[in-house]
Image (cartoon, rainbow, N blue to C red):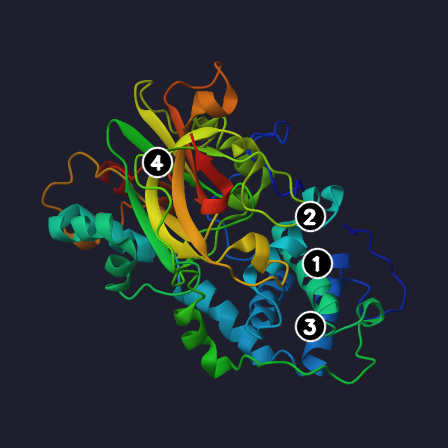
Amino acid sequence: MGHDHHHDHDDHSHLTEIELRVRALESILVEKGYVDPAAIDALVETYEVKVGPRNGAKVVAKAWVDPPYREWLRTDATAAIASLGYIGRQGEHMVAVENTPDEHNMVVCTLCSCYPWPVLGLPPVWYKSAPYRSRAVIDPRGVLAEFSVRLPETTRIRIWDSTAEVRYLVIPMRPEGTEGMSEEALADLVTRDSMIGTGLALHPEAMR
Amino acid sequence: MNGAQDLGGMMGFGPIAIEQDEPWFHAAWERRAFGLTLAMGATDSWNIDMSRHARESLPPVEYLTSSYYEIWTRGVERLAVAAGLVSDEELRLGQSLAEPAPIKRVLKAEDVPAVLARGGPAERPIGQPARFGVGDRVRTRNMHPQGHTRLPRYARSRRGVVELVHGAHVFPDTNAHGQGEQPEWLYTVCFSGRELWGHDADATLTVSIDAWESYLEPA
């Protein structure tokens, strides 16, 4: 990208090529009346302030403590997740997949950036990037090692490539030593990466 | 299409750039690019499959050297030009030169929560029963369409097992090209790592894709 700064007398001389490009696009679309800039503000605010992986963490914590809810999540994740108020765009068709000592699930979108927005928010840059998208399906243990996750050699690895409008939420294993913890405290152990499958839920020791 | 978006199994991109405490956006322009993409999507001037096809149609060098919000921005530019909403010259000059084209609807700030809550469900009614059931052995077709498809190259002409039946969903391969939704049954099909990558593959690996019925034949 154009990071060279031309110190001419143009008002936008401090802007990069992509900044200029987006600014031009917005001003044309607004001038023509196709886009309301206040709607852009509202969209950004939604995903910067209101939606994020704390939503998914609440789903996971509830599944850990509430067996009927866990069963509902298994059989109809869209409805079970909607019952907590997490609905809509990029979460219209949800499937929850559970990690066990025998099988570890990990989610990728090799073709673009499909990700369950209502429960995890917008995806991190690495999730959309070529290194993750290319290797998750062929070298998942190598990928996991980069996230400092090492699984037993006997644990099966299951990759879910999100090629359609179905979105996958990983239910990580409940850590040892969490018996008796409240649902709320358990949710704090559930990281974003543990719900993608590139991480594990935190051990309570890690929270001290 | 066999574009740069179809990354599964490629090598040489280096380590994953993991960022601690990553912000939702890395620059002000990313916020605008994100909002513009969604706001223009809400005008119904194109559908999500057309959006994906616009992005994957970028020249591979451009796709692979652009950040994701750059790819989205270039996608919106292409879609808006193709829909007759803006001209290349307007984009070049950064100003409107002509009267606006008619547009189906404009997203208002107060409608954002309802529009996001509604989302864009892809499931549709269908007249015929599913051809495959859970546990059926299938083989993906060997196909290399010039247009949009959601069957990744690494999973073409491969034997797998149907694991989930999702109902009938909008078919991206036609919907991306204005040829209608033509809903088809959608399945999760699971492959062994060795079927996909050969005998050197991790023996504990299985990979699934979501595949529309016409991607599959009995095996």
Q: Chain of mark 2?
A: B
Above/below status of B120 relative to B129:
below
Indicate which label's residue lies in the foreground, 3 or 1.
1
x and y percentages locating residue B193 in the rendered image: 44, 24
Marks 3 and 1: same chain? no
Q: Identify residue for label 4.
A: A105
User: Which sits earlier in the primary sequence, circle 2 or circle 1?
Assistant: 2
Indicate which label's residue lies in the foreground, 2 or 4.
4
A20 or B110: nearer the viewer = B110
**Do the residues under discs 1 and 4 have CB atoms within 8 angstroms?**
no
x and y percentages locating residue A122 in the rendered image: 47, 56
**Do the residues under discs 4 and 3 have CB atoms within 8 angstroms?**
no
B200 or A126: nearer the viewer = B200
**Residue at x 75%, y 68% (from the top left corner):** B81
x and y percentages locating residue B2 in the rendered image: 66, 40
**Do the residues under discs 2 and 1 have CB atoms within 8 angstroms?**
yes
Q: Identify residue for label 2.
A: B66
Q: Identify residue for label 1.
A: B74
Quarter in which the C terminus of chain B is drawn: top left
Distance from Cα at disc 1 to Cα at disc 4: 33 Å
Distance from Cα at disc 2 to Cα at disc 1: 10 Å
Whether residue A172 is visible to the viewer of this picture, yes or no, is yes
Distance from Cα at disc 2 to Cα at disc 4: 29 Å
Q: Chain of mark 3?
A: A
**Residue at x 85%, y 70% (from the top left corner):** B89
Quarter in which the N terminus of chain B is drawn: top right
**Do the residues under discs 3 and 1 have CB atoms within 8 angstroms?**
no
Q: Dot 1, how many residues are within 10 Å of its Cα: few (below 14), some (14-19), or many (20+)? A: many
